[in-house]
Image (cartoon, rainbow, N blue to C red):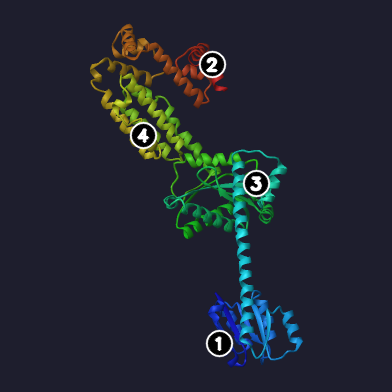
Amino acid sequence: MIEILLVDDESYVTESLALTIPWEELGVTKVHQAASGAEALEILEQQEIDILVTDISMPGMSGLQLIETASERWPNLRSILLTGYSDFSYARKAIQLQAFDYILKPVNDDEFIESVTGAIESLRDEWELHDRYQMLMYNRKASYSVLRASLMHDLLLGRVMSGRAFAAKLQEYEIAFDTETQAAMLLIQLGNHYTAMDHHSIPLMEYAIGNIAEELFKESFHVWFCKAPHDCLILLVEPNAQTQQLMEQSDEYERLRQQMLKGLISSFRDSVSNYLKGDISLIITGWFSFPDGLPAAYRSGLSSMFLTAHNEAGSVLYLEESQIQEQAASKALESLYRPSTLIHLLESKQWDSAREKITDVFRELGKTRYSREHLYEVFLSVTNAFMYIAHKGGQFISQIDQYALDPLLTQSNIVSLDKLQDWALDMLARLQNELSESDQYTKSYIIKQVHELVGSNTGHDLSVKTIADHVFLHPVYLSKIYKAETGEGLGDYIIRMRMERALYLLKNTNKKIYEITTELGYQNPQYFSKMFKKHYGMTPNEFRDR
């Protein structure tokens, strides 16, 4: 695609050339004409001119002046001079202005064609050289991208290298990061819009996301972007020297740094959504020392990415801010282990209380930023209680629900708080239907009464005799029934429940050992310590000091 501009104040010259020269054979697609230097400059402004052919002697602006002006503004332009003078001074000036050729009037067509052909070949050689250079730079950049990603993978996975070797790698791969400075890591997950694409399109989207990130962050941060070893993208950011200097002048360095990062992250998400029409989810680690803190930061971010139940499209999780919320979620699970435990309630057929306990656990957990790990803990604890009570009743949990422990369904249950709660309450109802028939007419009813008494009274007046009095049976007969039904002596059961209560009080209260002794109905702290050690293999003081 070559365009040429012919300039001469004698219009018949340009018209003759435009009509007689076989332009298409030369590869010229468009021929423009001008009658003055000023008109020529207007055309140069508006059109993509490759070759300028101009007369030297023109009123107003001479051809030499036109070439001088045009060369300054369009340095890749090829210029050819036409003149009726053979004075060498013109030729010398043309050479100084780097004109491509110099042709005397009247113009010989063959000579003109030869000159224009030379200019075209010169342009094509330049374009080819430029294309080669661009390809070389592209390949160089692509190679650097691979090398940078490989180095990042080594660092994330904990490879240790000497400070000198690492500094050399940074310089060799043109990574503008300083060691022993503070950096932060962004773990980026693509939303459903991207994951539904074919395997050719996804790398293009990842490349585009990296370009957007580098463009937005580069003014304030050094940026290192690549694909992580696991299923996400990594964006490493470090304040550049100018930003660092600006923030160090402030008394609120950390707040200003975090505020700047959050503002850029917000712009980053908006830009990705606007330009690529899809959402991304981000997990942002705390600030750490680069590069020593990289592996720990990556593991922390990766764990949160895999375990979080709040993985809706476009979500942003700052790990430093989420730690308080995670502590609240762990606190919410305490009710799961607080006596009376779910196993005890199921043993004593206290179905309404068991249902209330399960509901309370999910209600408290729903008030926090829980993770998938928290849901899995609830699932394991509840499943353990269900399996225990089913086995005591002589059944397998699979007989009550054949899909209860199906691995695929189990995973689907723990992705949502509501789904897990529905499953737990449904399984409880199934257990109740299977195990509660004719309670009041069987020995199981007596056991239920015993469990209710033990569960509601762990104080000093609790004994086999007092329980027997409550159920109107002889203590020996009651002990015999209880042993036959449960496989455990009644006295042993009472002690076990006291020890479980003691364990809870030691773990979750600041009560003194003698206060716990009295609360559990023991008169002697030494005897209580002996019983506790026999049950758990350590004294109460040793347990509390662990």
Disc 4 from disc 2: Cα separation: 35 Å
Report which quarter residue 61 is drawn in: bottom right
- Dot 4 or dot 2: first in sequence order is 4
How many residues crowd around disc 1 within 10 Å: few (fewer than 14), some, or many (20 or more)? few
Type of amino acid at the residue the image marks with label 1 = Thr
Nearer the camera: disc 4 or disc 1:
1
- Dot 4 or dot 3: first in sequence order is 3
Residue 160, percent across and down?
A: 66, 38
Q: Secondary structure at mark 3?
A: strand
Residue 294 left/right relative to 96: left
Q: Can residue 401 be seen here?
A: yes
Kindly identify which residue carries mark 2: 539
Kindly identify which residue carries mark 1: 20
Asked whether disc 1 touches disc 3, contact meaning CB atoms under 8 Å apart, the reply is: no
Residue 352, percent across and down?
A: 31, 29
Q: Secondary structure at mark 4?
A: helix
How many residues crowd around disc 4 within 10 Å: few (fewer than 14), some, or many (20 or more)? some
- Dot 2 or dot 1: first in sequence order is 1
Nearer the camera: disc 1 or disc 3:
1
Type of amino acid at the residue the image marks with label 2 = Thr
Q: Secondary structure at mark 2?
A: loop
Disc 2 from disc 3: Cα separation: 46 Å
Kindly identify which residue carries mark 4: 359
Kindly identify which residue carries mark 3: 182
Type of amino acid at the residue the image marks with label 4 = Thr
How many residues crowd around disc 3 within 10 Å: few (fewer than 14), some, or many (20 or more)? some
Residue 297, percent across and down?
A: 58, 41
Type of amino acid at the residue the image marks with label 3 = Gln
Q: Residue at x 58, y 52 (%)?
A: 261
